[in-house]
Amino acid sequence: MPAYFVFMRDETTNPAELKTYGEKVRPTFKGHEAKILAAYGKQEAVEGPAPEGVVVIEFPTMEAAKAWYDSPAYKEVRDHRFKGAKYRAVLVQGL
């Protein structure tokens, strides 16, 4: 069953760190079956406050998504995201 990581950036706190994250994140997908479905495109909040941006990434399974998120390559890069902005992240299983 597919799984989706949904990242919602609520507030940028350090633009330099966020820029570093943006420059380094793509290579972390190498060797992982992932498809970026949305990344900071136009959005419309229909319930609740709008985040600054949203990213949706599709993986073939929950396990595959967790393997990417917990990979050494992504762990090294995600610290820049943690330092650069306040995010919410959800991993949800598809149908």
Image (cartoon, grey):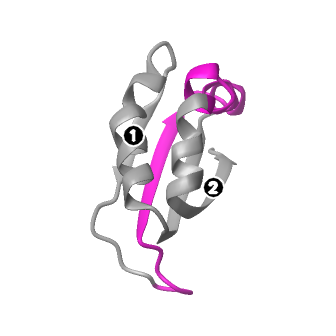
Q: What span is colored magenta in the figure?
A: 46-75
User: Of helix, strand and loop, which one carries label 1?
Assistant: strand
Residue picked out by circle 1: 36
In the shown orientation, is residue 40 left or right of residue 71? left
- Residue 36, given in percent of the width and then of the height, sits at 39, 40
Instruction: Say which element carries label 2.
Output: strand
Question: Mark 1 or mark 2, which has the lower sequence index?
Answer: 1
Q: Is residue 26 left or right of residue 79?
A: left
From mark 1 to mark 2, how far is it between C-alphas?
15 Å
Q: How many marks?
A: 2
Q: Which mark is residue 89?
A: 2
Question: Going 56% across and 22% down the picture, which residue do you hit?
Answer: 73
Residue at 67%, 24% (x, y): give it: 67
Quadrant in the rendering for residue 94? top right
* Quadrant in which the C terminus appears: top right
Looking at the image, can residue 9 be seen?
A: yes
When the figure is inspected, residue 90 is found, relative to residue 33, above or below; the finding is below
Mark 1: which amino acid? Ile
**Rendering quarter of residue 1:** top right
Q: Residues within 10 Å of mark 1 (few under 14, many from 20)?
A: few
Percent position of residue 81, x then y? 52, 49
**Where residue 6 appears, x then y in whole percent?**
55, 53
Residue 66 counted in the magenta span: yes
> Three-letter amino acid code at disc 2?
Ala
The magenta stretch spans residue 49: yes
Residue at the extreme top: 31
Q: Which residue is found at the position 60% from the left and 27% from the top?
A: 68
